[in-house]
Amino acid sequence: MAITFSDLHTESGLKSLNDFLNGKSYISGDKLTKDDIKVYAAVLKNPGDSFPNVSQWYNCVSSHIATSFPGEAVGVSLGGKADPAQSAEAEAPAADDDDDDIDLFGEETEEEKKAAEEREAAKKTAKKKESGKSSVLLDVKPWDDETDMKKLEEAVRSVEMPGLLWGASKLVAVGYGIKKLQIMLTIVDDLVSVDTLIEEHLTAEPHNEYIQSCDIVAFNKI
């Protein structure tokens, strides 16, 4: 929620700031920030005992500024005879202007939005890099001893998916002249589901012309 201070050159504005600073040392958080500097610049002078919270805060900010810029101001002089009170009265009609309101949580600039988008993109990229992988050993069984095992393996390896990498394979005798294909594969866990691979690809058309069923023999995280 935005915090807005208005008319800090008037008693009503200073009272609002004084109430806000009750129990606080700074405008935002527990240390000096740009919010303090922004509000400090809008307060004409230390209001004194009339507004003790503002007075204490004003002195604190002044001491920080003095530490940051030591020495005397010798490169500039101020002229004019106008009384500070008269200057405040002269500026009072402009108090109705929206520019006199200090919004500490205004809309983000284009640069800030772009920086936030870049941070989010970097987080997503890092998350993708952290995605785990698994090594799977799969048994692929033919319909019978007349199934062409070479074409069966070609059908298996023809399945391509993002995050799927086929590895070494071999034929293993089952019995009665039937052999099964044992094949290794590596998957990216977030991209490939072995169950989906089997049900929607390997044992579905057109691959089921050669493949009767598939079993997961081993599943290990890498």
Image (cartoon, grey):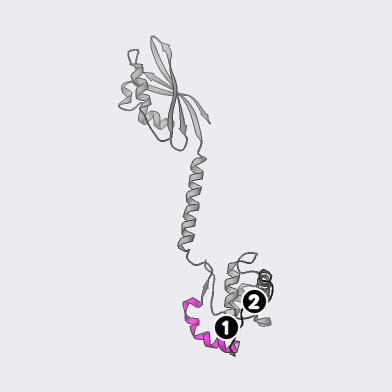
Residue picked out by circle 2: 54
Q: List the single residue furthest toward the top.
A: 176
To which quarter of the image does residue 87 belong? bottom right
Percent x, y for residue 9? 57, 82
- Where residue 130 sits in the image (x, y, percent)? 52, 40
68 horizontally vs 177: left or right: right
For mark 2, give the secondary structure. Answer: helix
Q: Which residue is mark 1?
A: 10
**Which residue is at the front of the view, 10 or 16?**
10
Image: 150 above or below 71: above
Q: Is residue 204 above or below residue 130?
A: above
Name the kind of residue labelled 2 in the image.
Val
Q: CA distance from mark 1 to mark 2?
A: 13 Å
**Neighbours of disc 1 within 10 Å: few (<14), some (14-19), many (20+):** some
Whether residue 180 appears in magenta in the rendering, the answer is no
Left or right: 96, with 9 as reference point: left
Q: Quadrant of residue 24?
A: bottom right
- SS class of the residue under badge 1? loop
Q: Residue at x 66, y 74 (%)?
A: 62
Residue 3 placement (x, y as % from top left): 54, 70
Indicate the amino acid at tag 1: Thr
Label 2 environment density (alpha carbons within 10 Å; few <14, some 14–19, many ≥20): many
Looking at this view, name the residue that lies furthest to the front: 75
Magenta: main secondary structure equals helix
Residue 89 part of the magenta-drawn span: yes
91 displayed left or right of 197? right
Q: Is residue 146 above or below residue 155?
A: above
Tally the numbered discs: 2
Which stretch did the figure color magenta?
84-99
